[in-house]
Image: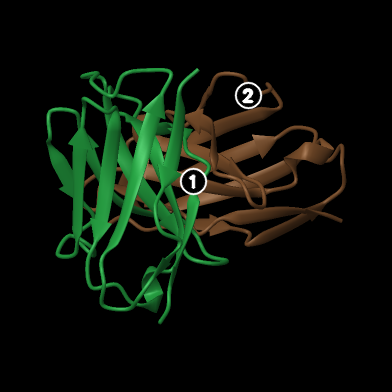
Chain colours: A brown, B green
Amino acid sequence: EIVLTQSPGTLSLSPGERATLSCRASQSVSSSYLAWYQQKPGQAPRLLIYGASNRATGIPDRFSGSGSGTDFTLTISRLEPEDFAVYFCQQYGDSPAWTFGQGTKVEIK
Amino acid sequence: QLRLLESGPGLVKPSETLSLRCTVSGGSISSSTYYWGWIRQPPGQGLEWIGSIHYSGSTYYSPSLKSRVTISVDTSKNQFSLKVSSVTAADTGVYYCARLIMTGYNRLDVWGKGTTVTVSS
């Protein structure tokens, strides 16, 4: 089973700052199968990035993804007030087929 | 615009069976491109994939839940369903249904709003 570990657990930043979120896999993950989601309180997750670096439909270009192998990064170039939320990485692979990281909370400093 | 809507009892007694339904609107569930899945989120915790189904009936489940989970599809109603047997308090949480793209860049691209299930006597 591939385990995804996200860091930090909480990121305290101000609007306008840059956010860098990490997702590390316990073994190599295909970049095609690495995605990122945003979740706000009381809402369902929303797909942000798929294939490690492709923005989903309607996602602003301040969101970008990168990485390969076991290390992946989600970057928010300039935080907007609506970006304060929890972010999950997810991979698809051998059983169990879909696994998620535990999440990184981006909070207002 | 594709929409998914979960429905079912919000309260289930321990040892009983949790049953939920996901209704798909704005698109057909009978597309070879997609799978349809269930994901849950215990209170204050992360996301856990439960299982997925193709309109053809092909299923696959999380190994940790496989012995208690059944997912089925009703193409005539554009719905798919989840059953979890012998529930305990650990099965409490928000249950989401989602559309799974499985064509290379695998991802969950459309989610329902979720429904809260509490297991309690």
Q: Is residue A32 left or right of residue A88?
A: left
Name the residue rendered at 39%, 74% in the picture.
B90
- For the residue marked with disc 1, what is the amino acid? Cys
Q: Is residue A26 left or right of residue A73?
A: left
Secondary element under disc 1, as helix, strand or loop, is strand
- For the residue marked with disc 2, what is the amino acid? Ile
Q: Which residue is mark 2?
A: A59
Q: Name the residue nearer the viewer: B71 or A101.
A: B71
What is the number of the mark on residue A33? Answer: none
Name the quadrant of the C terminus of chain A.
Answer: bottom right
Where residue B103 appears, as percent x and y from the top left, is: 27, 22
Q: Is residue A71 left or right of residue B12?
A: right
Image quadrant of residue A34? top left
Mark 2 touching mark 1, by CB under 8 A? no
Secondary element under disc 2, as helix, strand or loop, is loop
Q: Is the residue marked by circle 1 packed among few (<14), some (14-19), or many (20+) residues within 10 Å?
A: many
* Closer to the eye: label 2 or 1: 2
Subunit under mark 1:
A
Subunit under mark 2:
A
Q: Name the residue nearer the viewer: A1 or B34.
A: B34
Name the residue rendered at 49%, 36% in the picture.
A67
Q: Name the residue nearer the viewer: B120 or A73.
A: B120
Q: Which residue is mark 1?
A: A89
* Same chain check for tags 2 and 1: yes
Question: Label 2 to label 1, Cα distance in Å?
Answer: 16 Å
Where residue A69 appears, as percent x and y from the top left, is: 38, 41
